[in-house]
Image (cartoon, rainbow, N blue to C red):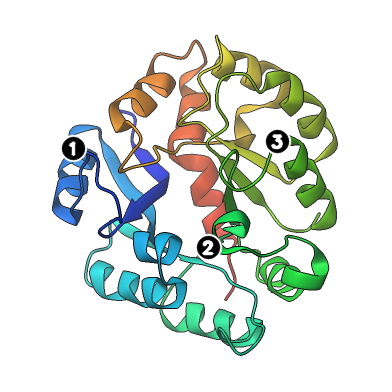
Amino acid sequence: MLRFIDARCMLGERCIIREGDPNTKEAILELMDRCHIEKAIVYHAMARESELPAGNMALIGETAGDDRFIRQWCALPSYFGEYMSAEDFFDAMKQHHVTSMRLLPKTCGYSLRPHSIGKLMDLAAQCHMPVFIDLGTELTTDESYDLCKMYPEVDLVFGNSGYRENRRLGPILEQCPNFYLGTGNYVAHCGIKLFCEYYGAERLIFDTGLPTGSATAAVSLIGYAEISDEEKALIAHGNIERLLGEVRL
């Protein structure tokens, strides 16, 4: 049976809770069990919605002792003494076994250009750490091209793509080998099949967007795709395992 590793999941109480969403760690684990999702890369809702430093630390406590959750911290450039330096941030990630970071430029109000997050991205490149960011909410698809070109040594995983992006994605995929696409919201007609045919299954990363995304729909999107079993395995778990396996903190 195909096993999955979810590359986009958020833990913790949110500011606005939608009825029916799995809003506790236990509810998310139960849903993961039903959908054969073995593990999930998780960041904390507090880091995104209210207090990023406190949210990153809250993630450590909420995932302690549970090896099904792979920790991800949200990044924040350090100016006006607001947060720890880039060097201290990476030291803390090493200490707490955090293996990826997430960018929230629109949510947290910072630039993606080198003068702002250059130190963070240089350190990510040095330790081969993948960096995650959502399309739509944090940057446009066209802006993802700029990000890939500014930081060519960093593997960038873009989630939340939507279903009308293929004409924008094509030229980026051809010119940016460090661009990886999350599958959870990539519901273009025959999108998974065409992506594999033209750009290879190696650049697709399974994700769900839990707790607001549908885990069952995300799993079905891969399970029913007209691609080989080998390609499904790469998307479901192989590609993200390779990226995380290259991290050297």
Quadrant of the snapshot with the C terminus: bottom right
- Measure how far apart labels 3 and 2 are at the Cα level: 21 Å
User: Disc 1 marks which amino acid?
Assistant: Glu
In the figure, is residue 80 to the left or right of 56? right
Quadrant of residue 145 within the rendered picture: top right
At horizontal 46% and vertical 14% (from top left) the residue drawn is: 225
Is label 3 or label 2 in front? 3
Q: Is residue 40 in view from this perspective? A: yes
Per the image, label 2 sits on a secondary structure element best described as: strand
Q: Earlier in the sequence, mark 1 or mark 3?
A: 1
Residue holding disc 3? 141
Above or below for 235 versus 127 = above
- Measure how far apart labels 1 and 2 are at the Cα level: 30 Å
Quadrant of the snapshot with the N terminus: top left
Give x and y (percent) for residue 214.
Answer: 32, 31
Above or below for 130 versus 179 = below
Residue holding disc 1? 19
Give x and y (percent) for residue 243.
Answer: 57, 53
Q: Nearer the viewer, residue 125 or 140?
A: 140
In the figure, is residue 208 to the left or right of 204? left
Q: Nearer the viewer, residue 56 or 17?
A: 17
Q: Which mark is residue 100?
A: 2
Per the image, label 3 sits on a secondary structure element best described as: helix
